[in-house]
Image: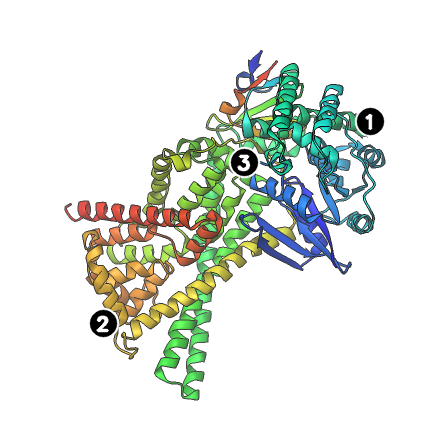
Amino acid sequence: MMTLKEVPIGSTVTIKKVCATGPLKRRIVDMGLTKGTPVTVRRVAPLGDPLEVTVRSYELSLRKADAQNILVE
Amino acid sequence: MSKTLALVGNPNSGKTTLFNNLTGSKQYVGNWPGVTVERKGGKLKKHDGFEVMDLPGIYSLSPYSPEEVITRNYLLEENPDVIVNIVDGSNLERNLYLTMQLLEMGCKVVVALNMMDLVRANGDVLDTELLSKELGCPVVPITATSGEGVEQLVARAVQIAQTQCDRKDPNSFSEEVERVLQEIGEMVAPMPHIERRWQLVKVLERDGQLLEKLKLSQGVFDKLEVLITRFEQQADDDAASIIASGRYQKIDSMLRSCYKSANVDYANTVSEKIDRIVTNRVLGLPIFLGIMWAVYYICIQTLGDETIGWMEELFEGISEYAGALLEAAGASEVMSGLVLDGIIGGVGAVLGFVPQICLLFLFLSFLEDCGYMARVAFIMDRIFRQFGLSGKSFIPMLIGTGCSVPGIMAARTIENERDRKLTIMLTPFIPCNAKLPVFALFAAAFFPEQSWVGPSMYLWGIVMVVVSGILLKKPKAFAGEPANFVMELPAYHWPRAKDILIHTWERARGFIVKAGTIIFLASGLVWLLQSFDFSFEMVDAQDSMMAVIGHYLAPVFAPLGFDSWQTAFAAITGFLAKEVVVSTFGILAGVAEATEEDPTLITTIQSMFTPASAYAFMIFTLLASPCFAAIGAIRREMGSWHWTFFALLYQTGLAYCMALLIYQIGSRM
């Protein structure tokens, strides 16, 4: 188990748990990052943050700090 | 009574295009009561007695962002006769998530399955009839950009609006969830006009808004809490997330039966190919800077500058014509002064900028509608986060280079309250179009050889945004909920010219109407103050009300180096409108048509300032409280006078301190 932040670019992983709380958690889940969903890490922004991932066949950007709260496998 | 058709959908689902198609030119824009989210409505084409209400673009009905709360309250309280839920057919899973929530609420929904041209081009196959059966509501495939299917959609929606709702929620959650919902149902009484199932789901989600309305006794509330907590412990997740997962599971199972993706390799899509270049680690920033430079070069330097010249000529012509007319009619000196200098001069000052601003908004609307602006936020987020803003703050500031008013309004897209307030406060530091003539005048008068002086104002503006961001990050009022940056990067598409033109016009109209009326009044006021004394006798400038007020103000500005009544008064007129500063000096110099290259004007300015005080004056103009129109925009967007005053005090205070610093250091060098 690792966090989404540590996933190397180009690999696809499955979400195990979203550890955030409050509005952030709700937002992450609403955008489709739910337990069991496959996620592909696409790239990192030119300045090293945020990340771009593909989830449910669309592109989503989120910060590394938020990605750290998402456990994947 | 007219019936209402409400348009609901995700951002980037083509909602605006469909709205433009449904209403044509019969649109009106306002605000939702109490908040600053835009409320757009219009009359439905070809169907009298139907209103179309464009609801904000949202991903979910969780009551967190103002847009979500508005949409939810609207649906609950105003009961639209039919909801047209626009769904991006090329991005079904996430788009249907909102559909599931609408159906849970018990709304009468027609799903408009948009972007069918893309779906077909991708080779995906979608059984819309089966999807309609699964959802339990009509599904009409459309392509909003070409208008295909829109007529059928309208016909269906009109028909549904006239019938009673007889549909039931298609979704069933897992056994555990259904059991808890049933248990909750035994404890909580139904509410009038509220879908029972939705009510139970909301109680399980611990929805604050609904629980407040339910007014449960402490005993029931505690029992519910025990029940929900036990449920959450068993599932090892919070209830709201379990419900969200449940909705997505239902969508997955529906799509398995009625949707067949051609499974195009993502790496081959056009969007991904573009992104590989424009958000490339090495090329991303240079490309971004290149695009910004190109926009600036075209809109401010070359083509945009030309248009200002044309407008000046136009208004000179009008002024001459009106002057001749007034003379022929035997109008008094006061009358022709008011009309020629006050009204025509004032309106000309504003309208002169209009073509340039339209041009700028045209480019920015294109960048926004095609999907590049989201990439800008993606690229810039790292930098902006360092001083307490997010990548989304960049867009308002970019628009602010044209005019702060639409820039401040563009801050609406920032969901986080704290980020939005900070962005509204700092956007006016970016030099707008109207400040440029002031800088050009002073640069020509004092720094003709130093070409860096003009552009240095942009640098100062940016530095002050950064410094203020860091300073204001700390105080409690701005602390709040830490902002997140979970943002969709929509697929690139080529926007329709019609939609871009409407978008540009919406922004430009804001500038023309709001700025126009205020600058018009302001120039009239300045003319009044400098032409009359307190007993309203027409006098020369040095005996006018303006001179008296300037004398009182002069000591305040003496430490900054502008200690004469003329300079002090000019500094103040900047609050009315920044370009009025130039015309104020013009009036003081006795030049009728003040342009920044006028030799008399330059000599006058040279006699009033030293290089140090001139630079201090430029800094003061750059940073001090923005013009009336922008103050009005700040008030509307902040939604409170308290915050507006804080913003103005901060801006003006900072301007005073910086100008003081620069004059005191500069005059000793």
Name which residue type carries label 2. Gln
Crowding near the residue tagged with mark 1, few <14, some 14–19, many ≥20 C-alpha atoms within 10 Å: few
Q: Position of residue B224 (x, y in %)?
A: 64, 24
- Residue drawn where x is 75% and y is 25% of the image: B182
Can you name the residue that lies furthest to the top here?
A1
**Structural distance between the alpha carbons of marks 1 and 2:** 84 Å
Q: Quadrant of residue B309?
A: bottom left
**Side of B483 where B29 appears, left or right:** right
Position of residue B133 measured from the top left corner of the image (x, y, whole percent): 84, 34
Chain letter belonging to callout 1: B
SS class, disc 1: helix
**What chain letter is assigned to the residue under label 3?**
B
Q: Quick check: B88 above or below B582? A: above
- Spatial CA distance of label 1 from label 3 is 35 Å
Q: Which residue is mark 3?
A: B375
Residue at horizontal 51 percent and vertical 54 percent from the top: B359
The answer to whether marks 2 and 3 sit on the same chain is yes
Q: For the C terminus of chain B, which image quadrant?
A: top left
What residue did someone put label 2 on? B542
Depth order, front residue of B250/B217: B217
Circle 2: element type = helix
Name the mark on residue B560.
Answer: none
The tag earlier along the polypeptide, 1 or 2, is 1
Q: Quadrant of the N terminus of chain B?
A: bottom right
Q: Residue at x 57, y 36 (%)?
A: B64
Q: Is residue A33 visible?
A: no
Look at the numbered discs 2 and 3 and tell me whether their residues touch, using CB distance below 8 Å: no
